[in-house]
Image (cartoon, grey):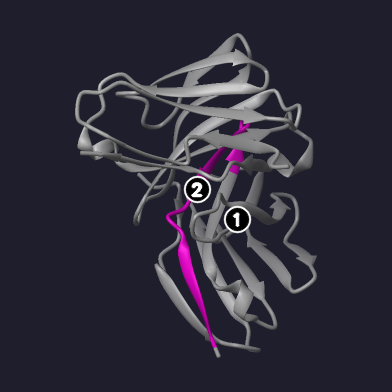
Amino acid sequence: DQQVKQNSPSLSVQEGRISILNCDYTNSMFDYFLWYKKYPAEGPTFLISISSIKDKNEDGRFTVFLNKSAKHLSLHIVPSQPGDSAVYFCAASRDDKIIFGKGTRLHILP
Amino acid sequence: DADVTQTPRNRITKTGKRIMLECSQTKGHDRMYWYRQDPGLGLRLIYYSFDVKDINKGEISDGYSVSRQAQAKFSLSLESAIPNQTALYFCATSAPTGTHNNEQFFGPGTRLTVL
């Protein structure tokens, strides 16, 4: 049973607009949630995280929102840029292990 | 220089062969992990190690074994490779709990093809 779900395999967004990537989880014991970005032929790289005790974390163009009651988090990228085209993995952490979602491929359109 | 390196980067092998994938890190982290990535399935944990004397099975350990030769080295072995082990393999490291948001740092990956 998937504990971390990314239900959209892909998403296309116009350059300059907002990209919103969604993630749902089932385990209320997760203590951190993370977003990773992956380009082809490279390993995933950490993008932004949020503690389970917070509901928002912002870093430049990237903001992560956490809704614990809905067991839902989202990553907002604004404005979207061509270099943001990549696969984004949502992940949840507990007991020093990270569980990853299946990923969402983001295409930024010119 | 890369903090987490993996060798080889690409490997083609035949069914039944033994193969080893190696991972080295210069981050000084105690914790190391092996994942595989398959299309549409995300990253799945194979094995992890919290220090040199600690080895733990992950979600999909069957058909794999690991060795933690030193703090900086963690190798993954396929004793008898089979075609459904064709995948992209990633090594990762992390600092202890409570530091760095539990972030893991990934190597560049090894693309393994089993014919």
Q: Is residue A65 left or right of residue B86?
A: right
Of the numbered discs 2 and 1, the one sitting upstream in the chain is 1
Labels in figure, total: 2
Residue named by callout 1: A36
Amino acid at pointer 2? Phe
Q: Is residue B31 left or right of residue B68?
A: right
Q: Nearer the viewer, residue B75 or A2?
A: B75
Q: Nearer the viewer, residue A43 or A12?
A: A43
Residue named by callout 2: A100
Q: Is residue A58 left or right of residue A107?
A: right
Q: Is residue A31 magenta?
A: no
- Please report the bounds of the magenta region as a residue range: A93-109
Label 2 Cα neighbours within 10 Å, binned few <14 / some 14-19 / many ≥20? many
Amino acid at pointer 1? Tyr
**Magenta highlight: main SS:** strand
Quarter of the figure that contains the N terminus of chain A? top left
Label 1 Cα neighbours within 10 Å, binned few <14 / some 14-19 / many ≥20? many
Chain on which label 2 sits: A
**Do the numbered discs 2 and 1 sit on residues whose CB atoms are within 8 Å?**
yes
Disc 2 secondary structure class = strand
The percent position of residue A77, horizontal first and vertical second, equals: 66, 75
Report how far apart the C-alphas of labels 2 and 1 lie in the structure.
Answer: 9 Å
Q: Nearer the viewer, residue A64 or A86?
A: A86
Residue B111 location, quadrant: top left
Chain on which label 1 sits: A
Q: Is residue B78 left or right of residue B48?
A: left
Quarter of the figure that contains the C terminus of chain A? bottom right
The percent position of residue A84, horizontal first and vertical second, equals: 61, 73
The percent position of residue B47, horizontal first and vertical second, equals: 47, 26
